[in-house]
Image (spheres, grey):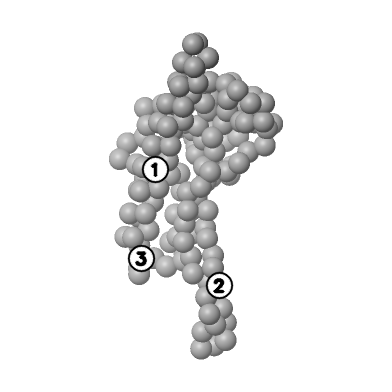
Amino acid sequence: MLASLLEYRALLERAAAMQVVSAARTAMAVRVARMAGSGGAGALEALAQENPVTWLAQPPKNYQGEYYRPDPGTIKPGHWYFDPSDKSINFLQSNDTFSPRTSKLLKFKVELLRELAPAGRDGRNVAILGLVLGQVVDRVASNNH
């Protein structure tokens, strides 16, 4: 019974974390739509370097701020932080993941997407840019983070 309760708690915590990510994705889509036609590729590249938490109406209550490659123990379990070293937002889960191969750290990063378009009049392929806020699969080494 206790194991089931812990498992449900972990699932609820992860679901809450994914709600924050969904809100950041929506905020990113709004920003991209606002700059469509005016900012071009440079604006998208700049947006990909920003802290996605700043796009939210307010940061999550469990957001600790920006930490450059924080040492283990710096971030409280159940809290978010932004790492400027790799431009990622990170959530350190409170509960063990029940698997030694699964990290307690959920890491998300804005990635710039490039797709080659058909060649233009000048014969060059033109890159079409887009952004995605995706989960980064971390190595097991961060399990003790």
Q: Earlier in the sequence, mark 2 or mark 1?
A: 1
Q: In which quarter of the view is residue 12 placed?
A: top left
Q: Position of residue 119 (x, y in %)?
A: 54, 82
Instruction: Count neighbours of disc 3 (C-alpha within 10 A) and say few if under 14, some if 14 to 19, many if 20 or more.
Output: few
Q: In which quarter of the view is residue 96 placed?
A: top right
Asked if disc 2 and disc 3 are in contact, CB closer than 8 Å, the reply is no
Q: Which residue is mark 1?
A: 22
Farthest right residue?
141
Q: Is residue 120 something that shows in the picture?
A: yes
Q: Say if 37 sits above or below 48 in the image.
A: below
Residue mark closest to the camera, 2 vs 3: 2
Asked if disc 2 and disc 1 are in contact, CB closer than 8 Å, the reply is no
Q: Which residue is mark 3?
A: 36
Q: How many marks?
A: 3
Amino acid type assigned to the residue bearing label 2 in the image: Leu
Q: Earlier in the sequence, mark 2 or mark 3?
A: 3
Q: Which residue is mark 2?
A: 116
Quote the CA–CA distance across marks 3 and 1. Answer: 21 Å
Q: In which quarter of the view is residue 100 placed?
A: top right
User: Camera-side residue: 34 or 136?
Assistant: 136
Residue mark closest to the camera, 3 vs 1: 1
Asked if disc 3 and disc 1 are in contact, CB closer than 8 Å, the reply is no
Task: Tell me the tag on residue 62.
Answer: none
Farthest bottom residue?
121
Q: Earlier in the sequence, mark 3 or mark 1?
A: 1
Q: Position of residue 65 (x, y in %)?
A: 46, 32
Q: 33 left or right of 107?
A: left
SS type, badge 2: strand
User: Camera-side residue: 66 or 76?
Assistant: 76
